[in-house]
Amino acid sequence: MNNTMNNDSKKVALTIGKFNGFHLGHQTLLRDITKAAAEQGMTPKILKLVTKDGDIFDKVEVEDFLKDRFPSIEGVEYITFSPEFAKMSPEEFVSEVLVKQMNVGYVAVGVDFRFGKDRAGDTDTLRELGSKYGFEVSILDKLMIEGSIVSSSLIREKLSDGDMDSTKMYLGRPYSIKGTVESGKKLGRTLGYPTVNISLDADKILPRYGVYSSVVRIFDGNEWHNHRGITNIGKRPSIDDGDNATVESFIYDFNDDIYGFDVIIVPEVFIRGEIRFSSLDELTQQITRDIDYASSITHQ
């Protein structure tokens, strides 16, 4: 965890989980702890379990989201699912982490919450331990939208399909990729389509590889400016066949030097999957078609 102790004398209203993406289901928990904290004079906080599954939004994006939507929440405490952590019994987790380190007075979790060694603890266990250690427990039902339970696995499935509309519906906001503009191979400039390349968090979950009609938001040091363009997400099989995925965007009618600027890419509509082209000329022709198509659907 980031901090070994909660130095605030006030009790904490806490929610616990993997929170992969802070989707609309997760947001019901965030609203619950902020309401409880306001009513009972507590400090609302999040305890996020870090796993190897990757994240739909990285730490910076999570901080931006909380500042925008839940400013009263002081932040996120991260706890890694280590071998030592996995050995803790349900009561050890409650007494050592929740009570001693977090100073909880209120805990909100979903109905399927499990904790402790071998996932032995459930919501009934948490309620019993809450009575023993003196904190209130709130259990919230799963959120359903259009007949589907909102979950991180469902959103990952929609991302892997390139279904950005459904992803947006379940997240409650558009999926986006935030990064800093870095120097690429400048091949796009050679082809007549200079691209904006951004750095990626290694744990970032990306949507289906391919080309998207997108919004590119650029921060000039004072404010964000929205531009339209197309974005390629993937391993560029016609160029370098690298092992690492890249995100590069061509912005319409834009030639400014923005190296080092923060940008947010919002892929909105999936246009096509990745294609291996036999020549750069063939690639250039396809880029032209992609831009024409993306422009046509943008203005419909």
Image (cartoon, grey):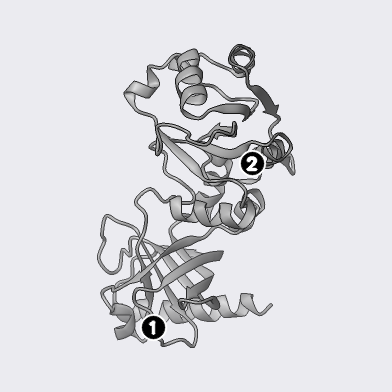
Above or below: residue 71 compared with residue 258: above
Tell me the residue that label 1 is attached to.
Answer: 193
Q: Is residue 163 visible?
A: no
Q: Are marks 1 and 2 in contact (CB under 8 Å)?
A: no
Taking the spot 62% from the left edge, 27% from the top edge, the residue there is 105
Taking the spot 38% from the left edge, 80% from the top edge, the residue there is 258
Taking the spot 37% from the left edge, 54% from the top edge, the residue there is 201
For marks 1 and 2 on the same chain, the one whose residue lies earlier in the sequence: 2
Using the numbered discs, state the Cα–Cα distance from disc 1 to disc 2 in whole angstroms: 43 Å
The secondary structure type at the circle numbered 1 is loop
Q: Quadrant of the N terminus?
A: top left
**Disc 1 residue crowd, few under 14, some 14–19, many 20+, Cα 10 Å:** some
Q: Which residue type carries mark 2?
A: Leu
The secondary structure type at the circle numbered 2 is helix
Q: Is residue 26 visible?
A: yes
Location of residue 206 by image quarter: bottom left
Residue 94 place in picture, x, y as percent: 51, 19
Q: Which residue type carries mark 1?
A: Tyr
* Disc 1 versus disc 2: nearer the observer: 2
Tell me the residue that label 2 is attached to.
Answer: 30
Above or below: residue 118 compared with residue 68: above
